[in-house]
Structure formats: structure tokens, C-alpha cells
Amino acid sequence: MGTTDEIMQRMSRKGLRITEQRKTMVKLFESATGYLTPKDVYEHMQQVYPGLSFDTVYRNLRLLLDMDVVEQIMFEDGVKFKLSCEEEHHHHHMICLNCEKTLPIRFCPMSETDVPGGFRVVKHKFEVFGYCENCAAAPAASASESDS
Amino acid sequence: MGTTDEIMQRMSRKGLRITEQRKTMVKLFESATGYLTPKDVYEHMQQVYPGLSFDTVYRNLRLLLDMDVVEQIMFEDGVKFKLSCEEEHHHHHMICLNCEKTLPIRFCPMSETDVPGGFRVVKHKFEVFGYCENCAAAPAASASESDS
DNA sequence: CTCGGTGCAAATAATTTGCACAGTT
DNA sequence: AACTGTGCAAATTATTTGCACCGAG
């Protein structure tokens, strides 16, 4: 049984309808290696449903976001979505600038970070960008993110 | 001599004109503690130049960005700008979710991070969000960023 | 049959561009 | 005077919303 069905069940339990489009969209995210822009989703989906409209994509992306099926990340060139991490444990990511595949980083730098007295930490972000094994050779369409 | 003049000199050397608006904009960034949205800039500037248009703000933001006077960061709620860091050394930031003031973090987690064999690291991002000493008490208009 | 989902078109919001005029050098 | 900067209005792009119809339960 695929996780897709499990997600569809959850939708059903929430009183939401199970439509072919939603199922296809979830499957798309499950098969995607990296991040998808709303446009990517629209284009992939359109191959299956020619009459598909952009708003449905947006609506369903938001739905999946609210259900924590996918997560949204802001890149320099806009929002992107990917399947939420399965890993329950706190972790960080290594992201391929070419295929956008993400690899988990177990190490969390917060423990090593010296926080000044008055500062109350709420959350943090640690992301490593580069090229994964497969893409290291030919970095074709590279994305961009500023270093800090 | 303020850094503003130095920046204006650089503009001049590039064949760009020194205008009151630009000078004011640079000064605005120098006096700002945290990040400014294009809208913030527009509003502050408009107090001085009532006839100011939004496009000029955008144009000059881009100009300052190209000159590395300011840097642009993507937050969940949109782009924001702040004066570029003076610190020559590589460092990271602690960002106040209320006033958006940034404190430098000298520690860089990359040295401690275990990078898998094939992955070629290009850049990384490490940011800590929370409330600074001054804002820790009354977190009024809190911003948002997702943890990862 | 009932209520949620979808397409369509229109509404917003954020940002960019063309053009004529004003300001800097 | 020569050329850049600015305001204005219009063009883009990304995303949201209202509405009537279609489809899932």
C-alpha cells in the first residue's frame, strides 16, 4: 500500500473529497526527487488533465500544506513545495542545486552555538547547498540561494 | 565622515548620479536596525518625499543590491533588505523576530558537518530566529519562518 | 441528493517597463 | 548641453476569490 492511499484516507476522514486530481498530485510529490514550484505541479498535472486550471493547483497545494503532506520553502526565485519529511527526529538538509534532491543532516548546530544572554531562541535554519553525487558532474540548470 | 558619503562616492565613480533620494535611502538603511520591505522603504521615504513613487524605490533597491550596499533575503512573507554586513569574516546570523535586528554568530557549523562522499558543497545557510534582549519581553508583531 | 471541488474570469498584490520630463554633472 | 533619475501609467507575474456547474459520497 502506498502512502498516497493513507493520505487520501486522512482527507476522507476530514470530510474532504477524494478526487483523481488530488490523488495524482500526491503521487506526483511522492515520485518527485526535489522541490516543485506551483508551475511545475501545474505542468506535470496538465499532462494528465488537459483542462486543469492553475487555481486548482494552488488550492490543492494549500490543502496539502494545511494537512502537512507537503512543506513550503521560500527560495530566491519563489516558493517551492516538497513532500514533508518523514523523519520524526529534528534534522537539517543538504539540497542539490541541480535536481533539488534533499539529504538529511543529523547534526544540529544549535548545541554548539553560543547564544548571547538576552536572546531567546525560537527556531533555526541550517541548510547546505551544493551538487549531489549524480549532479556533481553536469550542473545544468542551477538554482540560486545566497550564502550567509 | 559617514559611510553614506563613501557609498555615494562609489556611485559617482560608476557614472551614476547622486540624488537626494538615493542619499536618503542609504541613510535609511544605515539607521535601520533590522530588515526593511520595499513597502517599509517606500513609506519611510515618502515622509521626506511626498511625491515619491514605488518604482523609484524598486529601482534604487535593485541598484543598491547590485552595488552590494544592501542584501536581499527571502522571508516567508516576502523579500526584505538590510545593509550588507560589514564583517569581512564568514559568519551567520541571529535574527530577532520582532525588531529583526541581527546579531552575528561567529561559529560556522560546516566544519562540524559530515558531508556524504559525492556531495559537492557550494554554499550554506545557518540562521537562528528568536527574540533579542529588548524584544524578549514584549513580542508584538512577530514574523514567521519555518524551522527545518 | 448534498456539499465539496473545479474551471473560468475577474480581483489583488508585487514587481517591471516605456516614456516624457526633471535633475545632476 | 548630455545623459541619468524620476513619476506616471500600463504591463507582467504570482496568487486569490466569486460564481455556476460537475462530481464524490
Image: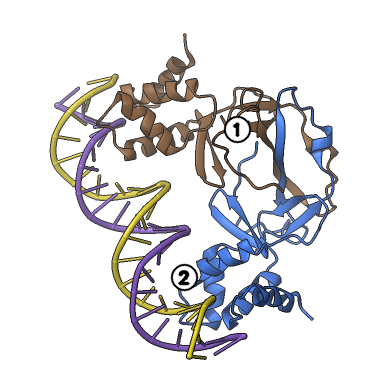
Chain colours: A blue, B brown, C yellow, D purple
Against A10, is B45 above or below?
above
Mark 1 is on which residue type? Pro
Crowding at mark 1 (Cα within 10 Å: few <14, some 14-19, many 20+):
some
Q: Residue at x 65, y 48 (%)?
A: B146
Q: Residue at x 38, y 39 (%)?
A: B58
Q: Label 1 vs label 2: CA separation?
A: 38 Å
Q: Position of residue A68 (x, y in %)?
A: 67, 62
In terms of depth relative to the viewer, which is nearer, B139 or A114?
A: B139
Against A87, is B121 above or below?
above
Against A129, is B72 above or below?
above
Image check: B25 left or right of A121? left
Chain name for mark 2: A
Q: Mark 1 or mark 2, which is nearer to you?
A: 1
Q: Position of residue B13 (x, y in %)?
A: 40, 22
Q: Position of residue B27 (x, y in %)?
A: 43, 20
Chain name for mark 1: B
Crowding at mark 2 (Cα within 10 Å: few <14, some 14-19, many 20+):
some
Badge 2 is on which residue?
A: A54
Label 1: state its secondary structure: loop
Residue B19 visible = no
Against A22, is B126 above or below?
above
User: Are tags 1 and 2 found on a single chain?
Assistant: no
Q: Position of residue A121 (x, y in %)?
A: 72, 34
Q: Residue at x 62, y 62 (%)?
A: A65
Label 2: state its secondary structure: helix
Number of numbered discs visible in the structure rendering: 2
Q: Which mark is residue A37?
A: none
Badge 1 is on which residue?
A: B139
Mark 2 is on which residue type? Phe
Image check: B25 left or right of D25? left
Rendered image quadrant of residue A139: bottom right
